Image: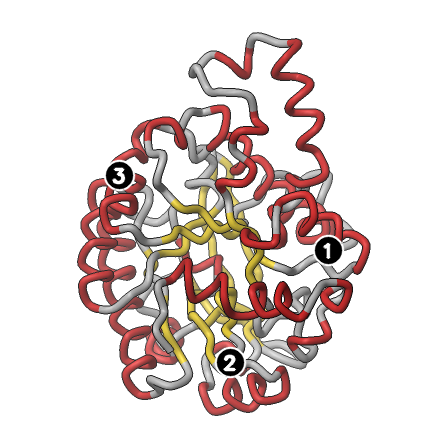
Amino acid sequence: MIIDPHAHISPESFIDDVRKKRFGKSVTIRKGKPWEFLVTRTKILGKERVHVNPLPKETYDVSLRLKGMKKQNVDMQILSVVPPMTYYALDKGLNKELSASLNESLLKIVDENPDKFRCMAQIPLQDPKAAAKELERAVKKGHLGCQIGSNVAGTNLDDKKLDPVWRMAQKLDVPIFIHPTDVMGVNDRLKDYYLRNFIGNPLDTTIAAACLIFGGVFDRFPKVKFLLSHVGGFTPWIRGRWQHGYGERQEPKVNKAKAPENYFKKFYYDTIIHNADSFEFAVKSLGVNRILYGTDYPFDMGNLSRAEKIPGLSRFSKKDQQKMLVGNVKKLYKLKV
């Protein structure tokens, strides 16, 4: 069995609501070829932002998704919403309502396809207390954890206002999957050549990892479990610079965090890197037990080939391959399948 914990979905009920203009101009759908686009208008740190994200039918058509999984040799997906749907810049009350609705829609998909899907909750992080309550409610109903963005409408993840969420995740013993969203520079130096994805996405994940380390989150919540998308962005390759800087500078010590090398193996990382040498380095550097298979389904920047064809996977023993393709996922998410 192969399990993919990095698979995105836009529940069809949500798409119907957008078509009915339930969210006004904040969330709309734009026609295009070869697919439609989900358009979100928000304000981040006082600046208006328009996010235009592809909406291929595979994001909401479950029958197409099942065909895609068969091609990839994937037996089960752990579903999370398409990252722009975190909606941290929307009204708190609206996102609280939206999160609960999305989570019920995800559970319905799982109930209809119990052999193929599990799910992770969407939580309204701009209201941390409400987010913690929704996480608790969702997990009790069957969610395996939650997906969050790499920042909260421009606020980094070390903000102590978010502590109720980390406390609840630690209490429930469920993982938190961090995916880049609202990445910095998308309307400035990263606006051309799709750099907002090529560089912006891994950069924002790296910033999130750094803030969790230097912000003392692991020290306040030593049992919290974070899964970083896209092999942690640039984190595995820049760890030496952080370690060196910690020894030379006072700024990384303001929250009394220990040296960064104490934390890298506390994270979990998925396999999306698209290069055999980079993948081999990450696995050897971080440890095979911290690496989980992931595809970023159904998007073109993901790894949509057959699971066993991950660049660099064949360089490891069959035992280690099985750990990365299924064993580590089952252990982290406490799956009995």
Which amino acid is tagged 2? Answer: Met
Of marks 1 and 2, the one in the foreground: 2
Residue 197 coordinates in the image, percent (x, y): 67, 53
Of marks 1 and 3, the one in the foreground: 1
Sort mark 2 into few (<14), some (14-19) or many (20+) by Cα contacts within 10 Å. Answer: few
Q: Is residue 45 visible?
A: yes
Residue at the right extreme, as displayed: 277
Q: Is residue 111 left or right of residue 196?
A: left
SS class, disc 3 = helix
Residue 286 coordinates in the image, percent (x, y): 62, 44
Query: Disc 3 marks which residue?
Result: 167
Which amino acid is tagged 3? Answer: Arg
Rendered residue at 29%/44% (across/down): 170
Residue 28 coordinates in the image, percent (x, y): 45, 66
Q: Is residue 285 left or right of residue 277?
A: left
Using the numbered discs, state the Cα–Cα distance from disc 2 to disc 3 in whole angstroms: 32 Å
Using the numbered discs, state the Cα–Cα distance from disc 1 to disc 2 in whole angstroms: 22 Å
Rendered residue at 58%/70% (across/down): 322
Which amino acid is tagged 1? Answer: Phe
SS class, disc 2 = loop
**Label whose residue precedes the other's in the sequence (2 or 3):** 2
Color theme of the render? secondary structure
SS class, disc 1 = helix
Q: Which mark is residue 1?
A: 2
Q: Give the answer, above or below, for where 61 lies relative to 305.
A: below
Give the quadrant of the C terminus: bottom left
Query: Disc 1 marks which residue?
Result: 279
